[in-house]
Amino acid sequence: MLRCPSCFLLLWKPVTVSCGHSFCKPCLGGSLPPRCPLCQERLKLLGVGTARCNVVLCGLLEKCVEREIRLAWLAAHVQDRLTHGDAEEALRMAQKGVEFAPDASSLLLCRAEAFAALGQHKRALEDLDAVCKAEPGEHEGFFRKGKVLLKMGQRAEALMAWEHCLTLSPHFHPARREMEKILAEDAPQPCTAAAHPDVAHQGSTGPQVDGGSPVFPSSSPQVQDQEGERADGRGDAEHGQGTATLSQPGRQQEQDTSAERQDRWLVDNEEETAAAKDTQPSLWELLSISDLECSLCIRMFFEPVTTPCGHTFCKECLERCLDHRPNCPLCKQSLREYLKDGSYSPTVLLQDIMLATFPAQLAQRRDLHQAEMAELSNLTNNIPIFVCTMSFPGIACPLHVFEPRYRLMIRRCQETGTRRFGMCIYEDGKSFADYGCMLEIRQIELLADGRSLVDTIGQRRFRVLSRGHRDGYNTADIEYLEDKKVAGEELQELQCLHESTYCLAQRFCEHGDLASRHVLVQHGPLPEKEEDIQALPDGPTWCWWLISILPLDPSYQLNLFSSTSLRARLTQLQRILTSLLQQPPPGHPLLEYNSWGRV
């Protein structure tokens, strides 16, 4: 679970990219790749110069991985960087490792190899001398020391180092191959004797190595190279041709088994890593709930998201912080680009760890969140109230949302799926009026700094039963209003009143210069009249459209709004329209005042 999906080794300096997947920092390279290696999503740095390590994952790795296995996978990562030709990064990683464990021979070997790859042979030799002194019984340090000495031109010293290596491990073929190459170059004539410390061909002569045992090169350089490749386990696989067979007892068996030892040092580290993995306690034994807690809500992570600066929070917690200030709550790194992007992808590895280690607690955390969402979804109890302006059923109400409390409120309305909230005007002594309109969100345009332009439309009228608060914004228990139905003769009279008032409204819209003014541009034309004037619980939509464009005093608008008698509303509208149509042309009629309010 804690392995990098790119190199398949244990994570080293884990970085969580914008899509939510986590990789070793070296695996991502010097710069962020254009797309995620796993999901192919386009990646972005979002306001930071370089990818930052995930602080929570680093802490989990530090706690879960024992010192020995950390050293093993660090050495494997350094070797991987060297294999890919990135010696500078390998050296940086090895330096960090040596600082962490100065006595770790495996990391000194890594650093020596990185030094050698960069041409810093003297520094490489210093590390190898330290390894040979610390572990005089291990052949690896002497073998690598010989290779560095050879690069420095010290052939005799290199031969001595390899001779000592073979003394410690007589069948370590890479050292034997290196010695054979040098001896082949120095030999006055080709020799065919076998290079074995115990058995030689008849009539063999030549230099004596390893306490008097003759070591001779192969019969030709080509055969010699092939034999060396077989010793490293690469002969047939890479070149597609056979290798020379040396004629001493047991040699063929040694060649057959040598293919399994491609790189003894790296394999040893991998085996050590595997062995340590087998003996490691499970994650649930090593971790506690506190290791997976959000630093903002002090609860178990729910939908954990990682910022570009490497810190992790619950998605909702981070969004609430960004409502107030576009900076990381911990390190204060600017998150303006992250906020502008708006895609808070969950950190996949953390979710997997929580599911594997604390499934019951995660389920409980999820149930708690769902209960909170269910409570927020109720459209009669504790509904969120936006205190701003008058709104009406069926009429658009565009909003510019910038206050942190209302940004939170709008976001919750979206998350619950209701996409609805109440709108009321302010009223002294009550925080907001006793009547309001339920609005439905149709579209939201998020701005770069977290503000939003919200397009809403009115749905139902309501009366406030009780008031409350939640996280800074107002809430209310409500009951919905509905016009009283009439029938028979009353309905016929109401229908006649409706027709005559609608005709006045049409004349009013054509009166003077009103049609060319911004009022109609903003609110659109007069809606068509309904066939059944009692079909909607709040009455005909055109009545509310007319009330919304007339510059009536809000208290008078609220009086019309709260009435559950369609006859009363139509009567009031008829009186207002008649008065406006009788006024003289000079001066726009909407700028005058009369007894019905600001008309």
Image (tube, rainbow, N blue to C red):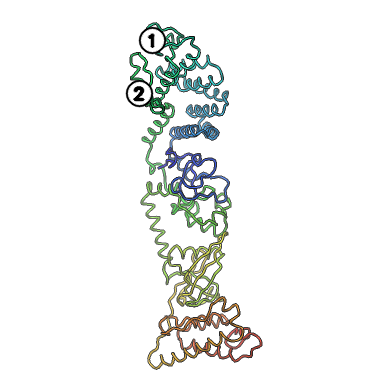
The span from disc 2 to disc 1 (Cα, nearest Å) is: 21 Å
Is disc 1 surrounded by few (<14), some (14 to 19) or many (20+) residues within 10 Å? some
Q: Is residue 237 left or right of residue 399?
A: left
Considering depth in this image, is 427 or 564 the residue closer to the camera? Answer: 564
Q: Residue furthest right?
A: 586
Seen in the picture, residue 310 relative to 482 is either above or below; the reply is above
Quadrant location, the N terminus = top left
Residue 514, how many percent across, how many down? 60, 83
Seen in the picture, residue 37 relative to 487 is either above or below; the reply is above
Is disc 2 surrounded by few (<14), some (14 to 19) or many (20+) residues within 10 Å? few
Considering depth in this image, is 186 or 582 the residue closer to the camera? Answer: 186
Residue 580, how many percent across, how many down? 59, 88
Q: Secondary structure at mark 1?
A: loop
Seen in the picture, residue 271 relative to 446 is either above or below; the reply is above
Q: How many marks?
A: 2
Q: Secondary structure at mark 2?
A: helix
Residue 197, how many percent across, how many down? 40, 12
Q: Residue furthest top?
A: 203
Indicate which disc residue 595 carries: none
Residue at 40%, 41% in the rendered image: 286
Amino acid type, label 1: Ala
Q: Give the labeled residue for mark 1.
A: 200
Residue 567, how many percent across, how many down? 46, 88
Indicate which disc residue 257 carries: 2
